Amino acid sequence: MAGTGDPKNFSANNDILKERESLLNFTKFLILTKPMQCIINRRAQFSASHRYWLPEWDEAQNREKFGVASQFPGHGHNYVLSVSLVGEIDTYGMVENLSIVKKVIKQEVTSQLDYGYLNDVWPEFEDTLPTTENIARVIWQRLAPRLPLVKIQVFEHPQLWADYQGNAMKATLTVQTHFSAAHRLALPELTLEQNSEIYGKCARIHGHGHNYHLEVSVAGEIDPRTGMLVDLDGLHQVINDYVVEPFDHSFLNKDIPYFAQVVPTAENIALHIAQLLQKPIQELGAELDKVKLIESPNNSCEIYCNQSLQPQEILSYREPALTGIK
Ligand SMILES: [Zn+2]
Ligand SMILES: [Zn+2]
């Protein structure tokens, strides 16, 4: 290093080191004295029925908008509720006393909704239909005066859930689906040996397959009357038309034109799915929020879609990174 032999420079370097050390100690002091925030999650469940039916519409209008969910006298779900709370860890080592949290959730929510007909149980559902996203919103309103909420999550079933974070009529709805596909991870400009060095067994020339699980989250405003932030049938249709139908039982590298140029890693598949879905979901009146692709129980990835998903930006992901790989 230049100048390290010079005693004057040595003392200057020493001063800098001392200054850094005191800054580090001050940072440690700040971290240790700042109250520790922690999020806790409490799960609960209830079984309830509901019907998507607006009395001001005739049978045909209800049927067209809500499909079989408009049928008399309704249908039911085993709902799972997750309540997330934030706070500092108190002298008892807790954010909130869980036995109190449990009691409040039971008192304010599950004891009232369990085995009930949601449309009639709470007056809020007379104004806005009890869709998954609206149930999450109303549960937030009911619990917020008593618990330090950060998120309410309601699962209608394992393939459909809503997240609400106290943001007026804004919510997120997630649907889960799956497809099976084969792929091979290799860059065309590299030798088999080089590809194997980077991608391991995934570079084997005849490829291999996965049962992919796909979660698509869309964000939007809950309609004050229908309770829907997006047309659910429309969303399923878009995911099916743009992703499941073309991807299912395909060899991604050969059957999906995009992957002729781009290596179909889980990350690149998720990114391409986000690119495919962004516009059609906008046309349904919602925003694509997140795409999560689960390749195996050990491997998944998430693309947050509040950023540009333009194809040219992903080219940098393709730069071969041979150096430093053992
Ligand atoms: Zn339902
Ligand atoms: Zn694979």
Image (cartoon, rainbow, N blue to C red):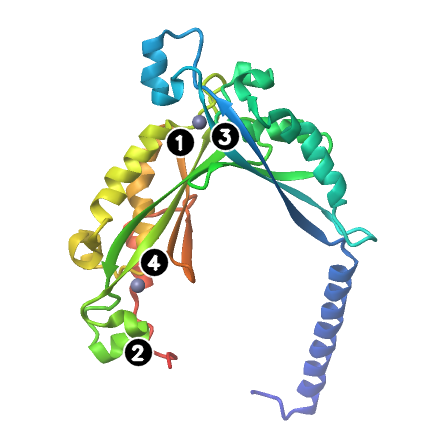
**Label 2–label 1 contact, CB within 8 A:** no
Q: Residue flagged by tag 2: what amino acid is it?
A: Glu
Which-is-in-front pick, marks 3 and 1? 3
Q: Position of residue 117 (x, y in %)?
A: 54, 20
Q: Residue at x 60, y 32 (%)?
A: 166
Tag 4–tag 1 contact (CB < 8 Å)? no
- Please give the label number shown on residue 286: 1
What residue is disc 3 on?
133
* 139, 217: nearer the viewer: 139
Q: CA distance from mark 4 to mark 2?
A: 18 Å
3 or 4: tag closer to the N-terminus: 3
Separation of disc 3 and disc 4 at Cα? 29 Å
Q: State the residue position of label 2.
A: 197
Beta carbon at label 4 within 8 Å of ligand 2: yes
Position above or below: 104 against 311? above
The foreground one among 218 and 246 is 246
Mark yes or no: residue 177 visible. Answer: yes
Residue 72 position (above or below residue 98):
above
Query: In the picture, which quadrant includes the N terminus?
Result: bottom right
> Which amino acid lies under the numbered mark 4 shown in the image of this protein?
Ala
Secondary structure of the residue carrying tag 2 is helix
Amino acid type, callout 3: Glu
> Which type of secondary structure does the marked residue at label 1 adopt?
loop
Q: CA gap, disc 2 to disc 1?
A: 42 Å
Q: What whole-number distance in Å separates the C-alpha atoms at marks 4 and 1?
A: 25 Å
Badge 3 marks a residue whose secondary structure is: helix
Count neighbours of disc 3 (C-alpha within 10 A) and say few if under 14, some if 14 to 19, many if 20 or more. Answer: many
Q: Earlier in the sequence, mark 4 or mark 1?
A: 4
Residue at 77 percent across and 61 percent down: it is 32
Q: Secondary structure at mark 4?
A: helix
Q: Amino acid at mark 1?
A: Ala
Which one is earlier in the sequence, the residue at label 3 or at label 1? 3
